[in-house]
Amino acid sequence: MNTYQAVPQGVCARQLQFSLEDGKVHDVSFYGGCNGNLKAISKLIEGMPAEDVIRILKGNDCAGRGTSCADQLAIALEEALEYE
């Protein structure tokens, strides 16, 4: 299992961390941001294929920012998949 960290851009969360094993997402944690919502996202996507998470979350917008914590996670997952 490989663990990745990313610094989100344009959102309240200051950092995110997740693991990938066999292309599946595990142990997602956000530092900062909307705590309850981000914990819920983490629980909902646990064990899902990263490609599915990207498809679902990429492009999600928060308050007209053009991105969101969920979108930033999708971007980080795309980058991590390049290393897998």
Image (cartoon, rainbow, N blue to C red):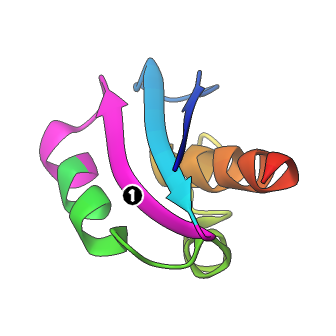
Q: Mark 1 falls on what kind of element?
A: strand
The kind of residue tagged 1 is His
The stretch in magenta equals: 22-38
Q: Which residue is painted at 54% across and 62% down in the image?
A: 21
The residue nearer to you, when weighing 60 against 3, is 3
Check residue 32 for magenta coloring.
yes
67 horizontally vs 48: left or right? right
Give the image quarter of residue 78: bottom right
Residue lying at the far left in this picture: please name it.
Answer: 36
Residue 5 lies in magenta, yes or no?
A: no
Categorize mark 1 by other alpha carbons within 10 Å: few (<14), some (14-19), many (20+): many
From what the image shows, is residue 67 above or below residue 45?
above
Q: Is residue 29 left or right of residue 35?
A: right
Read off the residue under disc 1.
26
Depth check, front residue: 82 or 53 = 82
Residue drawn at (17%, 38%), measured in percent from left and top? 35
For the question of whether residue 63 can be seen, the reply is no
Is 76 positioned to the left or the right of 28 in the image?
A: right
Residue at x-position 51% and y-position 50%: 1
- Residue 31 in view in this figure: yes
* View extreme (front): residue: 1
Considering depth in this image, is 83 or 66 the residue closer to the camera?
83
Corner quadrant of residue 4 = top right
For residue 16, which quarter of the picture? top left
Q: Position of residue 75 (x, y in %)?
A: 71, 49
Q: The C terminus lies in which quarter of the figure?
A: bottom right
Q: Is residue 79 above or below residue 43?
A: above
Name the residue rendered at 38%, 74% in the picture: 47
In the orientation shown, which residue stands out farthest toward the right? 82
The spot of residue 74 in percent (x, y) is 63, 56
Q: Position of residue 64 (x, y in %)?
A: 57, 47
- Residue 19 placement (x, y as % from top left): 48, 48
